[in-house]
Amino acid sequence: MPATCFPTASALASSWDVELLGEVGAALGAEAAAHGVDVLLGPGLNITRDPRCGRAFEYFSEDPHLAGTLAAAMVRGIQSRGVSACPKHFAVNSQETRRMASDSIVDERTLREIYLTAFEIVVRDARPDVVMSSYNRVNGTYAHENEHLLTQILREEWGFDGLVVSDWGGGNDPVAAAQAGGTLEMPSPGMDSVRRVLAALDDGTLDEADLDARAAEVIALAARERPRDAGRVPDPAALLEEHHALARRAAARSAVLLKNDPAAGTDHAAAAGADAGDGPAAPLLPLAPGTRIAVIGDMARTPRYQGAGSSEVNASRVTDPATALAASALEVVAETQGYRRDGTADPALRDQAVAAAREADVAVLFLGLDEMRESEGLDRTDLALAAVQIELLAAVRAVNPRTVVVLAAGAPVELGWAQDAAALVHMHLAGQAGGQAVADLLTGAAEPGGRLAQAHARSLADHPTADSFPALGEEAVYAEGLRVGYRHLDTAGIDVGFPFGFGLGYGRVALADLRVDRVPSADRPSADRPGEAAVDGASTDGAPTDGAPVTLAVVRLTATNVSDREIGEIIQLYVSRPSSAIDRPVHELRGFARVELGPGESREVAIELTERAFRHYDRDREAWAIEGGDAVITVGRHSRDRVLEATLHLEDRVLEAAPADPAAPRTAAETALRAIHETRPLAGDAAVAERRELGPNDTLRDLEHARSPLGRGAHRVLTALLRRAERSGQPDLNLLLLHNMPFRAIAKMSGGLLGTDEVRGIVDLVNGHHLAGLRRIARAALTTRTASRSLAREIEGR
């Protein structure tokens, strides 16, 4: 059905705007309700462990505090319209390669501090009705049947009382899922899972109380009553028009101005600490009315405005940048394609673009990743733009130094080519109104309101997962521990293209008068809850609490707009523990505030710091704890901007008991050793290249190593189809799903046509046991249909 295509999550995260995320969530909920949708499958809030993840455009950030805070706002917005939100994918889902069969090996501290914190914020602060489990294993156990994740953490610690749904085809063992807290398999796997559950009840493997609990969760969701006013929209067209305007505002608010040199095109100042407008000449942007521009690039007329895969939206309308710029106050003197989208060199297109740029006051060049570079079902192999695009930029800049690049990419790319741009506007994947937002930004009708939600490294080699992502074997070992994104880059002191949180505006906000006010225990929210202790008191007894975050301090400062136009700024607060005895990143984002100021306006900004800002997971005590000592609080405009500093003294204390998964590696160091010994080198599929016996949890991509020529032939056919789709320039989600799908999912995705026994017969075939496999399939096909019909009649008769 036609719907509003809002900017993707990675774009919206760059707005750092809690209120905006709530508005977008409410709009999504309203449209879902209008179509009779009860549960909206989102938002996605997995941590971007490596920017090459093909689904990174669906996720918010590399930082759990930012991701969780924004996702919670979206969940509240969705559910305000009577539709249940379903945050996903729980948990530690970081790659598309082998995503339904990969095992994420991660130590308990990293698991909780990096990969679960965003989900914790959403569950405890926004109370979603549904959570979707991830495809992958976590420390050896599939997420949908992982008791540590679903029962001990999600339900018992965080108090979640809703429904846990599997990702589509992500179910493995329905009995284990029912025992562990996994409620619902999707899509409906037919009667095969029902028979397995009933058999487990009969032999005592499954306790009836566990099955009753899961059934009660489904009933509770179905019976939940919420106002469905949005479902009675008198004028759906007016609703879509209103939401298109919101999408336009959201795209501009999420756009990040990475570079804005003076109009003469001088060299770009160092990203860290440089303010727009510090040079002797005015920055190139915004452009004055009547400026003669050349619009260059295939993506100007056919924009990349959303990612590919199951999140793809049938947009109600799409306004491309070329059309929007032609309707603006700027004068478009030429429009040219510039390059082929598939990366094929075309000197004629390049020459046309150079000629157009030579005749214009300003060249506006649209660059970005094509559809085959970012899609559900595949991961990128590098962080580069197509060479033809970079070469075109250099050629255009050579004839017109007043060149603006508008970048479309759902996740970070290497930006070494940015030296050839006088101005660089990162739109991410900006949704259906992104073209109008570009025109608003270039003309100054809108302020570039975004700040990077992910650091942009200069090179792929600077990422700690450069040589190990994606994992091609059975295990994906998170050897880097806490060192994800800016936590690694800033701690290691690596020079970056643009730091986490960076972004320029068309004006400047000055920050001053920092103070940190400790909140007395009597004044703190939830201070009387069981197990609570004073901020400077002794340790608690470790008893579980109701989870409400307790405010320990309030950081206050003054923000002043020293510009002659209304602008916004995102004030970012980082906490470091320089004298810590615990291995930590150099600093971590712990608070932020977006402030909008009129010309010359000053305002006091207050940012609360709760226990979450200072806690760490103490593996020895199996509890969240605060380490005693001084905490340095830094306020600035990005992770490397230290404008204001203050110190807060903390006393050692235990906050909340949080038992560890006994199967998880105890420390990041142990995980790193395991990575070295078990999964490296990870060059291609060489690690598993030998012919071998395959099992139900091996993937169809593993057919390459099947003992049977039938299996290897099927792999060649699938590979050929994938390559044909790649040449077309459009990813085929069905083929990508098949490529990474385990054999067991054949039953889960067939709607009951096939069962577990048929899958075992297929596995026998690809392992070279041809007669045994055919006999098993034939026998199972007959018994499966007979048993399914009988069970269906029995259920209908009840």
Image: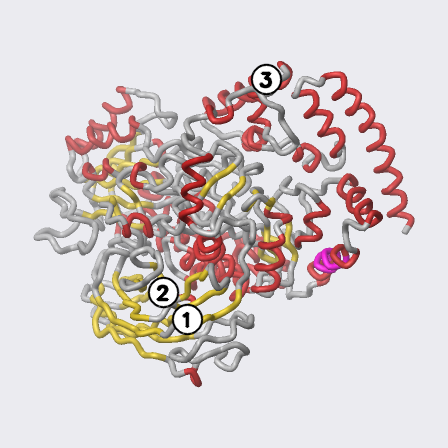
Ranked by sequence position, the earlier of labels 1 and 3 is: 1
What residue do we see at 55% from left, 26% from top? 701
**Residue under pointer 3:** 712
- Where residue 381 sits in the image (x, y, percent)? 39, 31
- Main SS of the magenta part reads helix
Q: Residue 234, relative to residue 354: is it above or below?
A: below
The residue identified by callout 1 is 610
Disc 2 target residue: 591
As rendered, which of 322 and 608 lies closer to the eye?
608
Name the residue rendered at 50%, 32% in the picture: 473
**What kind of element bears circle 2?**
strand
Span colored in magenta: 212-218
> Eyeballing the image, is 701 above or below 451?
above
Left or right? Give the position of 677 relative to 565. Answer: right
Question: Mark 2: which amino acid?
Answer: Gly
Q: Is residue 365 visible?
A: yes
Q: Which mark is residue 290?
A: none
Please name whichever residue, 707 or 724, is drawn nearer the observer in this view of the structure: 707
Amino acid under disc 1: Thr
Q: Quadrant of the N terminus?
A: top right
Q: Earlier in the sequence, mark 1 or mark 2?
A: 2
Q: Amino acid at mark 3?
A: Arg
Q: Please name whichever residue, 571 or 524, is drawn nearer the observer in this view of the structure.
A: 524
SS at mark 1?
strand
| Residue at the image position 55 percent from the left and 54 percent from the top | 661
Asked if 11 appears above or below 788 in the picture, the reply is below
Q: Relative to 284, is 796 on the left or the right? A: right
Nearest the camera: 542 or 524?
Answer: 542
- Disc 3 crowd rating (10 Å Cα; few below 14, some 14-19, many 20+) is some
Q: Is residue 314 visible?
A: no
